[in-house]
Image (spheres, rainbow, N blue to C red):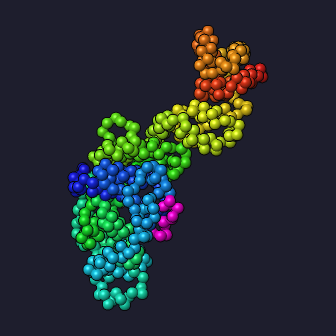
Amino acid sequence: MKTEPIKIEPGHLRARIAPSPTGALHIGTARTALFNFLLARRFGGKFILRIEDTDLSRSDKKYEKDIIENLKWLGIIWDEGPDKGGPYAPYRQTERTDIYRNYIQKLLDQGLAFYCFHSQKELDEEKKNQLIQKIPQRHICSFRDLDINEVKKKSKKKSIIRLKTPQKIVNFSDFLKGQVVFDASLLGDIALSKDIETPLYNFAVVIDDFTMRINYVMRGEDHLSNTPKQILIQEALELDKVNYIHLPLIFDPNRKKLSKRFGAASVAEYRRVGYLPEALINFLVLMGWNPGTNQEIFNLEGLEKDFFLEGLQTSAAVFNIEKLNWLNGEYLKKINADKFYELALPYLEKKKFFEKRLFSKEKLEKILILEKARISKLNEVGESIDFFFKKTLIYPASLLFWQKTDKKETKEILTRLKKIISEISDRKFNPDNLKNLLFNEAGKFENKGYLLWPLRVALSGKKNSPGPFEIMDILGKKDTLQRIASAIKKLNLPA
Ligand code: GLU
């Protein structure tokens, strides 16, 4: 059940995306970023990017770069960052150590946090025993009330800083989950910081959200179990409360966690194979948000005005690659010829059969445009137009046969076509004329396919391809006749 959010004055909404740079920008993180971005835009607030890089052993600059690059590519742009580092610099936790130190010191001074000197081995041992005894696994630390002088004596020993977790019930409301009640005594003494300089995740998040004046925390529901810990830290420091929205996760069509095969790839991977940012945005927003109408096509600009929180769904979203392919195809259809050429050429250049120097830009534009409405992503470029670039077409002679026509009839038809086409003057060799003339000729048959099918196969070598008149126009008279002659030759060979 959805609950009422804390009221925020118009224009004061502050949301964030806080990825850890431990991997490339994931499709789920991109979705969370998009919803936060839209939330901020819709309510005239601010959207912030915070790189959560406190875990030095797992964080990597190359992932930070990937996250930034791909959010920008999607058009999910943040409004604020630190003063230094240029317009797109994000906040980074590693640059905020002084801030965390102040707050952790405050908790220590107030006796609300303490040094825990238990070794990892001791903690593991404790957990194991709790498991055997079937009691909750938690560490209520025997050092929590240690005298300051005792602490000083032990100061050489390895320690971490923990919150003196109060034994109480934590209550919070989540916009999608409703009222959540959690028994804090199950948590044990929450780990806050490795030392005074090195905060751990839950502590850093609370301090960051507070100091960045974040009032809406929207994130994946895998973080739901962290929320009571974060609330206890807020309460210890007497910080403001925030609104929580925990988004249901994304599943594959079999209702399993996303795998490499289904959707778990990074945004960069989708970008690489030729999905457009507009299509991905449209796809992402529909994974977990219901506009309440049958509308399926959404762009970022429109969403900034139309997005509403009540549209967020409480059940898991399903990743449907067919839907993404369909959307991408729709966006590809809409882009103009120049833009398509610019986007598609790099993909064509990667194909082995393609030798750019043999074709003028004008011709390539004409060829590529034939494919615009036929593909669902850019790496398919070339699949249905490769025959333009090949000297010899490889296909079985039988492909030339229209329905029940045989070799002899097909040969006659192709020979007739060759004659008609050779008599067209160069000046009249254009799609309109060709269409008029050949349609007229095809009309003499019971069905146009008798003539147009073998013609199209002779030109393309394919079962499916663009229409014969466009192909002829691009190939020109000489190549057209040559391809028809090759088809006739194929039919002369013994089957
Ligand atoms: N850094 C966390 C993550 O990458 C997100 C933390 C948060 O949203 O509170 O999953």
In percent of width and height, residue 297 lies at 40, 38
Relative placement, left or right, of 156 versus 225 is right
Task: Please indicate whether residue 259 sits to the left or right of residue 312 in the image.
Answer: right
Compare residues 237 and 2 and report the one nearer the observer. 237
The image quadrant where one finds the C terminus is: top right
Q: Residue at x 60, y 34 (%)?
A: 365
Q: Is residue 300 left or right of residue 274?
A: left
Residue nearer the viewer, 357 or 332: 357
* Span shown in magenta: 55-65
Q: Residue at x 40, y 59 (%)?
A: 49
Q: Position of residue 264 (x, y in %)?
A: 48, 51
The single residue placed furthest to the top in the displayed view is: 444
Is residue 64 depicted above or below 300 in this figure?
below
Residue 182 drawn in magenta: no
> Where 395 sits versus 302, above or below?
above
In the rendered image, is residue 141 in sight?
A: no
Q: Considering only vertical position in the picture, is 396 above or below 59?
A: above
Residue 2 visible to the viewer: yes
In the rendered image, residue 267, in percent from the top left (x then y), is placed at 48, 51
Give residue 382's quadrant in the image.
top right
Q: Residue at x 38, y 88 (%)?
A: 154
